[in-house]
Amino acid sequence: MLIDELITVMRKHVQKRLWVISDLQQNRPERATKCMTTAVSDFMNLELPVDAVCYLGDATEGNNLHFIRKMTEMQQRELARIDAPVYYTVGNHDFDYFRANCRTNGAMCLPFVEYMRQFPQWRLPDSISDMAYRVDFDEFVAYFLTDHADPEGRWYTSHGEIRGNAQAYPYTAEDYRNLMNQIREEGKSVITFSHYSFAGGNRAAPLFDRFMPLPDNLRMHFYGHAHIGDHVWAGKDCYRKISCVDGQPIMQVDVASLESGRGSAIRSAVVEWYDTHEIGVFFRNHLRHCWDDLLVVREGEGERTELY
């Protein structure tokens, strides 16, 4: 009840609101449909208009193309109920079909991504080889750090590593640092979104170490991949939703997952940017139709203060 009251009180201060989701990750259409419709219906009942849906990867699982197509079409229909663009970052399970069917036959094939490109609501990397894309939300800028791949299928990234022919991977450590320099030069706050966490988060991506240290104007990071409650893959930290980037006062938030098989619930997060430059994060449990937790982050929270 208290979180609901806080959301009501803060409505007049909201400048931007995002719905952040990740990891529907089902290999059977009927399971995927149940999880997605549960999440979307519960979210719609909240009557919280959003400026964007940020979908952080692993929308499907498995290599059965018929099942993938059914689950993809269902997600397009369900998210079309929300009057906002959907920004997608590619995750490791987006490559399941390629790994099983195309790895020895050349060209990269990502059925979910290729299907969604035909819908104006869906925003995706211009090229599958792009490691990031930028969206300006006026009050802040978002960078979506996405798994990426060679269109010819020679290499791809997955689990924060380079798979396939690593010698053909075109990005150097300097390219990763240049992206952080670009963020530093934005002149305003930046929020990043990815399928993976930075060091210090759950199931962190080794490639993301090339980004370190992160610029001071990077306020928060949101990721999926580590399903909350999944002891098998997330280990001892499987219930940890909030952590700092190693060695830096930058919060990163695990929003996974949209499924309750591996994860302990169908989960997502609502992110609000306030006119005070504070950021509110509200963790939604769609199975229980309630808010589980909240986090509020102040601007400059990580600045050092010394007392002599």
Image (cartoon, rainbow, N blue to C red):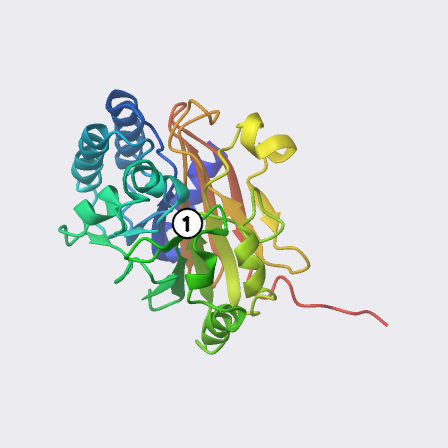
Residue 250 image position (x, y, % from top left): 59, 58
Residue 166 at least partly seen: yes
Farthest right residue in view: 308
Label 1 SS? strand
Q: Is residue 227 above or below residue 163?
A: above
Please provide percent x and percent y for residue 2.
49, 35
Name the image quarter holding the C terminus: bottom right
Tag 1 residue = 271
Rendered location of residue 87, percent (x, y):
29, 53
Q: Residue at x 55, y 32 (%)?
A: 233
Towards the viewer: 169 or 289 = 169
Spot the residue most to the front: 104
Residue at figure coordinates x 25%, y 21% from the top left: 30
Residue 265: name its quadrant: top left
Q: Quadrant of residue 126?
A: bottom left
Left-right relation of 29 to 277: left
Q: On the picture, is 40 further left or further right than 185?
A: left
Percent position of residue 23, x then y? 38, 37
Kind of residue indicated by mark 1: Val
- Taking the spot 56% from the left edge, 27% from the top edge, the residue there is 232
